[in-house]
Amino acid sequence: MSGDRIAVIAGDGIGPEVIEAALAVLDAASRRFGFTLDVERLPYSADHYLATRETIPDAAVEHLRTGVDAILVGALGDPRVPGNEHARDILLGLRFRLDLFVNLRPVTLLHPSLCPLKDPAAGPRVIDFPIFRENTEGIYVGAGGGLRVGTPDEVQLAEEVHTRKGVERIVRYAFEWAKANGRTRLTMADKANAVPAHRLWGRVFAEVGAEYPGIAREHRYVDALAMELVREPERFQAIVTQNLFGDILSDLAAGLVGGLGISPSANLHPGRAGLFEPVHGSAPPMAGKDVANPFAAILTAAMMVRELRHLDAADALESAVRAALAAGVTTPDLGGKCGTKEVARWVAERVTH
Ligand code: NAD
Ligand code: IPM
Ligand code: MN
């Protein structure tokens, strides 16, 4: 029996280290739960780009579209490529070209000590909500350009794109998720008071939401939502928003539950192979020092195997990370003294037994 076909783009900076950690833990999970992952490593990265001037070839994108079951990405971004063109082509390129319109970024407090906020009077905090970030539109479409570049009269234009179909599919996905997961409220964030184009979000949210009578609709302007997320994160059940706001809010929310070192994500289109990546970037100053936190990548791997329907393995990976947190087996960003490899070994061992 052949296994799930996993394409791996480890990428730059700490990407390769956290991906090695995730693959080691996945290997343990696949042995324990009796499935096979056929891992194919792809070279696309800053190194590859600097050596060949190739970001990601069309043939590779086609292969990822039709010949794999999931894509696992480390991180892309390197100071030797200051224009970030390889990362845009590879990361944003794959999100757009594979039409992975859902960027699911779970925000879950896995251990009370990870929340930097003071404890509320009512006891320990429970923070557990996904951010559904629209992943194929907004200001990320790259429409625009520069005029008189490099002169005192320079002008730069970047157009935001919101289509009825694009907004509707992410909003519907978020409502469906809320319904399937027993949530009773969905929060939508825009900036329609300043940007009239965002009113499309409000109209679609109301129309689609009317089909989900069990789920209360809540609207917030994104600036106010940022404030509320810090003051009372436990009241959020699920959030849906446009591409740029989802990018920013997901880092803010990561900060409420332990930071980027522990925040996973999935780029999805139902029925197609998804792309799974930590929310964090390549953290160039940490690279090669065995200090990067592998939890984000391991939890990302858990999202991947959950999507591949290896539910026991996904549960085991998540509970092994919780156990590591409870045992204080963590990297320095979470206050621990362990290295990347040591944490990965501990988690793999835990998954095995
Ligand atoms: P970053 O996520 O790389 O780092 C931001 C902060 O988080 C740093 O303080 C870093 O030390 C910390 N951090 C991140 N991951 C960590 C981990 N696993 N363990 C411990 N600490 C961790 O963001 P940045 O510094 O803004 O960007 C660096 C490069 O990464 C840039 O080129 C950027 O474009 C790129 N980037 C790529 C992705 C991606 O590939 N998905 C995401 C974000 C940023
Ligand atoms: C992310 C990153 C990317 C984004 C960058 C690297 C282009 O910040 O995945 O959150 O803005 O989407
Ligand atoms: Mn980001």
Image: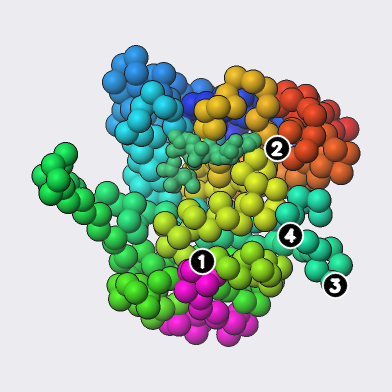
What is the C-alpha distance between the residues marked 4 and 2? 16 Å
Q: Which quadrant does the N terminus fall into?
A: top right
Q: What residue is at 86 percent from the left and 67 percent from the top?
A: 123
Which numbered disc flags the more N-terminal residue, 4 or 2? 4
Mark 4 surroundings within 10 Å by alpha-carbon count, few (fewer than 14), some (14 through 19), many (20 or more):
some
Q: Label 2 sits on what residue type?
A: Asp
Q: Label 3 sits on what residue type?
A: Ala
Magenta span has 212?
yes
On screen, residue 311 versus residue 286, left or right, reads right
For disc 4, does the CB lie below 8 Å from ligand 1?
no
Q: Which quadrant does the C terminus fall into?
A: top right
Q: Where is mark 3, residue-wise? A: 122
Q: Residue 127 in the image: x percent, y percent?
A: 72, 62
Examine the image and state in which quarter residue 297 appears. Answer: top right
What is the C-alpha distance between the residues marked 4 and 1? 24 Å
- Tell me the number on the disc at residue 219: none
Q: Label 4 sits on what residue type?
A: Leu
On screen, residue 32 versus residue 244, left or right, reads right
Which numbered disc flags the more N-terminal residue, 3 or 4? 4
On screen, residue 292 versus residue 75, left or right, reads right
Of 339 and 16, the residue lying toward us? 339
Q: Residue 143 in the image: x percent, y percent?
A: 23, 52
Which numbered disc flags the more N-terminal residue, 1 or 2? 1
Q: Where is mark 1, residue-wise? A: 240
For disc 2, does the CB lie below 8 Å from ligand 1?
yes
Q: Where is mark 4, residue-wise? A: 117
Q: Which residues are magenta?
A: 206-225
Mark 3 surroundings within 10 Å by alpha-carbon count, few (fewer than 14), some (14 through 19), many (20 or more):
few
